[in-house]
Image: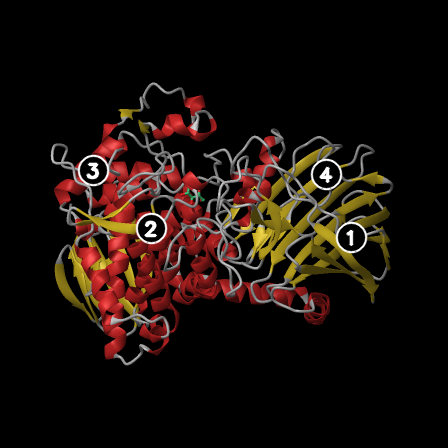
Amino acid sequence: MKIKQPVYAIDNIISDYNDLTVYETVFHNANGYIGVRSNFEEGYPEGIDTIRGSYINGFYDIAEMKQAEKLYGLVEDKQTMLNVVDTQTIYLIIDGEKFSMFEGTVKESKRWLDMEKGITGRYIVWRSPKGKEIEISIKRMTSFTQLSLFTIEYIVKALNFNGNIVFQSYHRGEVQNYSNENDPRAARESSRYLVPAQAVVEEGVSYLTSDTSKSALSVCTGVAHRLSKDSSIVTKLEGHSASTKIDTAIVENESIQLVKYTVFSDSIRHKDCTANAKVEMGKALTVSLETLYQAQFVYLKEYWNNCLLEIKGDDELTEAINYNMYQLIQSVGKDEHCNITAKGLSGEGYEGHYFWDTEMYIEPFFNLTEPSITKNLISFRYKTLDKARENAKILGHAKGALFPWRTIMGTECSGYFPSGTAGYHINGDIAYSVVAYYLVTKDLDFIAEKGAEIIFETARLWMDVGNYSNGTFRINEVTGPDEYTCMVNNNYYTNVSAQYNLRWAYKFYYMLKEAKQLTNIEKLGITEDEVREFERAADLMYLPYDNTLKINPQDDSFLDKKVWDLENTPKEKFPLLLHYHPLHLYRHQVCKQADTVLAHFIFEDAQSMETIRNTFHYYEKVTTHDSSLSTCIFSIMASKLGLIDKAYDYFGDSAKLDLFNTHKNTKDGIHTANMGGNFMAIVYGFGGLRIKENSIYFAPSLPKQWEQYKFQINYEDSQIIVEVNAKETIFTLVKGGSKVIHIYGISYNLEDVVKIALQG
Ligand code: BGC
């Protein structure tokens, strides 16, 4: 399928140096295994901020986490994703003058991302201080079909001279991570994590292997060059770096092409990563660049076939949404050794950690477009279940598993436990995601093999952390999604997700028993008595409700606090976390992000519409949306409540977050959860989609700004296209057997096409 608005492009005449780091993120290349920021090949002059980085998903070292007071069980070290190499650097020298965007005259300059081809590029026309003019076209690709491979195709054309050009290209193994001591979202201290192990040049290819300082891992990168004309290519080792010099003549109107190949390998996936890098390089060099580009295109064609989403009447928005979906496939891990980081592979914000973002914001997208990716993400959690069991023990629990709030390889990495480890809802989120995957695929075999073990171990944890009191089951001293309210009793979101987790443990037990697939579960020692206890706790789960306001309070003490005066808080004081002491925030009714409102979206059957409506209006007044995970949820709930203009405004705020750098931190990386949330705001919000145990439901609405929107989803064995315009909504079954679907509460048999008048 051809996508509309496949190219995102900007004119790139540099006026503000701060934009440079933002575009390094926006135009980065990644494929789920590797990510390379979009740094200029020739670099910037000294003193201009840059984050020059290349990353491997799941590859980490251990960094010290300094705790001022050594209390029992506090985290003392963390994993951090490493900048592993710099292979981006290529200097171009024409008759002794070095090309730079900061000298001479930049007559034209563009940067672009082609989302159908999976390639980014730069196009520049430059006049040197001495009057030589050149045209430069650069294309970059991280291959989806050979995950280890990153290519730079660099073409230079002489426009008004005959002369000499030199490419000076580098492969640097001694690199560091970026740090910013003033921003809690970036690492504070910069350390050198990689220790040089081996450097060789074989058949003109340089291979640099480094070891991590503490995690006992190794990484190897290989770099090769190919030039479109015969010329000498000389590669020399200098310490733990290699430099390659290519010196050649050029005549007016001649174009010369240099291709720089980098392969990455690591010891998590390959015992001998140096040997593997050599194999990978051999593979890359046996095919032409054109063949590699073609394979990239074919891969993405298949991807776009599965995630059609179009808005008629707003091309810019369609482009932003395509951008978001493209970033999700770029960012998501493609093997069981990794997951999807909060910033994808585009930057170092949050140090490459995986959060609940995966389960609640990103998997809903993959469930509907490419469920095998969700399966992989759940398999990653399954693989780390033993670490989660250990974590539960550290926190004093006698049984069950507690997943870490943030992690790379499975152990807890949050330094500040009130808005980290205390976020026990991560357990409910992971359990929820297993159920969500099941509801969309009905893949009971996967539940038997892996999913159920996660559900039972998380259910056991709730039984241990909670307790019965006055005939109800309560969960004390936890933090819900809203990180401006910490360490509370009976956070509504946490309790309702624990209830769901416990109920599904019960259900799965009997489903698996009937299917004679309990073998894997029996080894956990789960008995019928235990699952009946799960059901009892779920039935008696305490869900806070306020009789006067007729809302669900966020927790037991939320409504007793002073309401934060958001209206009179100066704009420059946002995000509040950078300007106010945490205790000051915790003492107020002020929310960083959707909490109870999110609970009402995902567990909508737990409350009446009246409670849901009142609760939405109440929290709207006290929510700052300082987290990028928030406005998309408010948009979905505004749609549910028929507040379409409001839904549209919330949606607009989040759709272009990274393209417009609205949170002012895109330089540290894209916001992957927000990108998934955006998709949800259309499909679950405007489209009103819900997938429940017995059926699939839609309740479409159309913002007045749009003529039409259209999306496609996978559901069980079928693919359904939903088209909504001002007159009607059209449901077309494009694949699979007929389905019973519910539209505005009425059931229809979808065999081919169902058309219904638009309501509302
Ligand atoms: C949010 C968390 C989120 C994290 C990573 C924080 O700002 O409050 O909910 O998991 O960012 O995206």
Quarter of image, res 102: top right
Residue 489 drawn at (x, y percent): 28, 40
The answer to which of marks 4 and 1 sits earlier in the sequence is: 4
The answer to which of marks 3 and 2 sits earlier in the sequence is: 3
Q: Quadrant of ligand 1?
A: top left
Mark 2 C-beta closer than 8 Å to ligand 1: no
Task: Using the numbered discs, state the Cα–Cα distance from disc 3 to disc 1 in whole angstroms.
Answer: 67 Å
Does the residue at mark 3 contact the one at mark 2 (Cβ under 8 Å)? no
Which residue appears at 38% of the width and 51% of the height?
Answer: 426
Residue 466 at least partly seen = yes
Look at mark 1 in the image and give the residue it sits on: 254
The quadrant in which the C terminus is found is top left
Q: Is 304 positioned to the left or the right of 204 in the image?
A: left
Mark 1 C-beta closer than 8 Å to ligand 1: no
Look at mark 4 in the image and give the residue it sits on: 126
Secondary structure found at label 4: strand
Q: Is the residue marked by circle 4 packed among few (<14), some (14-19), or many (20+) residues within 10 Å?
A: many
The answer to which of marks 3 and 1 sits earlier in the sequence is: 1
Look at mark 3 in the image and give the residue it sits on: 615
Mark 3 C-beta closer than 8 Å to ligand 1: no
